Image (tube, rainbow, N blue to C red):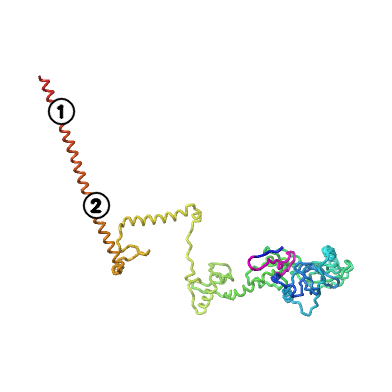
């Protein structure tokens, strides 16, 4: 199946990746280049665990990563997996310090089913052979440990990997092993790191061991690497699964050595007016040093930069003493006490809003109380004139400002006249209303008087009739 990309890079190539069960794999970043495999006849073949070999493809067999091949061995043949082809193989040969005049063996063919049957039978006997070989070495009182056994692909040869602190005479052991297993015996001494790489495992970092995945050369590790990085010299933490110092301690030691040069010596004491300060600890990568007023235990710790420390050392050489270790700008003010419960309050956002609304309300009140502002204090183009009296002359001189002032004055005069007229009209209306009220009152009073007179006349007439 062919995968296509639409970004102009052509096909999606996965040939550079290898199977995950193989160790010390090399990513072939030239795998998708046409004709890469045919340019070099050298092929990298990997056997059990970390053992690799370089062979010549003299028969021009089309090989790709992952192909199982039968290669030349002494005696017979061996079975391995192709892990690299093309232009990167000579670079890997140079990296592994393979000599140019070394005899390079060739590839016979791709493995057949018959070859795979023999290979599987020989591989099934490896664990039992290792256990029995350990018993034989123990019976011979040899100070050595047999860590692994590897059979050749055709089963005619067995390689015994052993670990020993001192030189071991294993001539008698070879005779006993040859009689017991009826194969050709080869002994190879390996170190504790190579044994850990062959066995494999997970490191304290949570990843697979470096010696089992990509490391090919093992550089000696010393405790000075831990001292440069300020790591506690605890053997249980510094040792890896091989019981040796961890290889990863060498990864960053060069960076720490360079950063250490930017810090003063630990033996130098800093003199100030407050007292004498002694080195306590240093954060090398951040270029920060902590000084204490006592040599034996931390007291009154002050942390400064390496630059500031060199400045104080230079002042002390001249006979001067600064007031404090820290610079004036770097002195930290005491922090105010904060209420942590207040931060979790539900109404903490409403307080700011109410505060802003209160400020706006007060501004509106001030505006209402102030009334109409003079023309000189009007905000023009979004900029407030803080000193209107000082800018009054410049405004009046400008023709645009003069026109504006005239227009505003005319408008104010019109407003005043209209206000007077309105006042006059309202006064006339009031007088008319008052006269109408008076007229109504008069009519009512006159009617009431007439009614009184009629009643009096009636009463008189009634009296006269009674007398008669």
Circle 1 — which element? helix
253 and 33: which one is in front?
Answer: 33
Residue that carries the numbered disc 1 in the rendered image:
455
Judge left or right: residue 20 versus residue 448. right
Magenta range: 6-27
Judge left or right: residue 175 versus residue 457. right
Q: Position of residue 387 (x, y in %)?
A: 32, 66
Circle 2 — which element? helix
Identity of the residue drawn at 53% across and 70% down:
304
Identity of the residue drawn at 76% across and 66% down:
66
Residue that carries the numbered disc 2 in the rendered image:
422
Q: Position of residue 423 (x, y in %)?
A: 23, 51
Q: Position of residue 168 (x, y in %)?
A: 82, 72
208 and 403: which one is in front?
Answer: 403
Can the viewer see residue 67?
Answer: yes
**How many other residues sit within 10 Å of disc 2, few (<14), some (14-19) or many (≥20)?**
few
Q: Main secondary structure of the magenta part?
A: loop
Answer with the quarter of the image where residue 206 lies.
bottom right
Q: Quadrant of the C terminus?
A: top left
Q: Earlier in the sequence, mark 1 or mark 2?
A: 2
């Amino acid at each position: 199946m062919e995968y296509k990309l639409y970004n102009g890079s052509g096909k999606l190539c996965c040939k550079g990746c290898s199977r995950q069960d193989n160790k010390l794999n090399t990513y072939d970043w030239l795998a998708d280049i046409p004709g890469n495999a045919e340019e070099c006849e050298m092929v990298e073949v990997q056997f059990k665990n970390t053992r690799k070999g370089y062979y010549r493809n003299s028969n021009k067999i089309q090989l790709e990563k992952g192909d199982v091949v039968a290669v030349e061995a002494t005696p017979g043949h061996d079975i391995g997996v192709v892990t690299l082809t093309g232009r990167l193989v000579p670079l890997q040969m140079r990296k592994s310090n393979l000599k140019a005049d070394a005899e390079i063996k060739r590839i016979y063919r791709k493995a057949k089913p018959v070859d795979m049957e023999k290979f599987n039978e020989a591989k099934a006997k490896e664990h039992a052979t290792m256990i029995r070989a350990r018993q034989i070495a123990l019976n011979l009182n040899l100070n050595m440990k047999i860590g692994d056994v590897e059979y050749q692909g055709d089963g005619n040869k067995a390689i015994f990997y052993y670990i020993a602190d001192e030189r071991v005479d294993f001539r008698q052991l070879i005779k006993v092993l040859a009689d017991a297993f009826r194969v050709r015996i080869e002994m190879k001494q390996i170190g504790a790191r190579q044994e850990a790489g062959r066995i494999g495992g997970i490191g304290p970092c949570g990843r697979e061991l470096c010696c089992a995945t990509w490391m090919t050369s093992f550089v000696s590790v010393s405790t000075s690497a831990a001292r440069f990085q300020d790591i506690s010299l605890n053997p249980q933490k510094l040792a890896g699964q091989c019981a040796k110092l961890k290889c990863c301690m060498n990864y960053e030691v060069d960076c720490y050595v360079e950063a250490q040069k930017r810090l003063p010596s630990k033996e130098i004491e800093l003199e100030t007016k407050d007292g004498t300060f002694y080195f306590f600890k240093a954060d090398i990568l951040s270029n920060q040093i902590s000084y204490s007023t006592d040599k034996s235990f931390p007291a009154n710790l002050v942390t400064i930069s390496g630059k500031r420390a060199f400045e104080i050392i230079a002042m002390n050489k001249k006979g001067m003493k600064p007031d404090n270790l820290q610079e004036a700008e770097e002195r930290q003010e005491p922090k105010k006490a904060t209420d942590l419960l207040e931060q979790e309050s539900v109404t903490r956002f409403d307080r700011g809003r109410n505060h802003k609304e209160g400020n706006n309300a007060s501004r509106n009140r001030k505006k209402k109380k102030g009334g109409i502002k003079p023309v000189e204090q009007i905000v023009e183009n979004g900029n407030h004139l803080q000193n209107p009296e000082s800018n009054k002359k410049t405004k009046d001189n400008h023709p645009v400002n003069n026109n504006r002032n005239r227009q505003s004055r005319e408008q104010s005069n019109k407003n005043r006249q209209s206000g007077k007229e309105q006042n006059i009209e309202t006064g006339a209306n009031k007088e008319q209303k008052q006269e109408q009220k008076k007229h109504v009152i008069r009519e009512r009073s006159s009617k009431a008087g007439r009614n009184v007179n009629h009643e009096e006349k009636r009463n008189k007439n009634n009296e006269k009739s009674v007398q008669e």
